[in-house]
Image (cartoon, grey):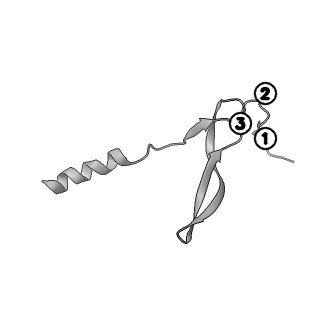
Amino acid sequence: MAGDERQGAGAADAPPAGHEQEPCPVCGRPVERVIVGRRKSLGIFVPEWGPGPCHAPDCPRYASSRGAG
């Protein structure tokens, strides 16, 4: 039946669960994606995603995992 076919189709179209990664713009190592800003689209604010801090100590974009202070 058509209803049975539709139930399984949605699962394949969904994005994979977990953290998405992209390369660091400086060193090329994988970094997590984070929200870098928001923009207004059709009357609502939507997040803009970009590369997060790099965790490679030799990279200029390095962010220590220790808290400041």
Could you give the CA–CA distance between mark 2 and mark 3, rounded to whole angstroms? 10 Å
Which label was assigned to residue 58? Answer: 2
- Label 1, secondary structure: give it: loop
Is there CB contact under 8 Å for labels 1 and 3?
Answer: no
In the displayed orientation, state which residue is furthest to the top: 58
Going by the numbered disc 1, the residue's amino acid type is Arg
Give the labeled residue for mark 1. Answer: 66
Instruction: Say what secondary structure mark 3 lies in.
Output: loop
Q: How crowded is mark 2: few (under 14 residues within 10 Å), some or many (20 or more)?
A: few
Name which residue type carries label 3.
Answer: Cys
**Does residue 35 lie above or below 40 as drawn?**
above
| Label 1 vs 3, first from the N-terminus | 3
Where, by quadrant of the figure, is residue 45 drawn? bottom right
Image side of residue 66 versus residue 28, left or right = right
- Disc 1 crowd, CA 10 A, few/some/many (<14, 14-19, 20+): few
Residue found at the very far front of the displayed protein: 42
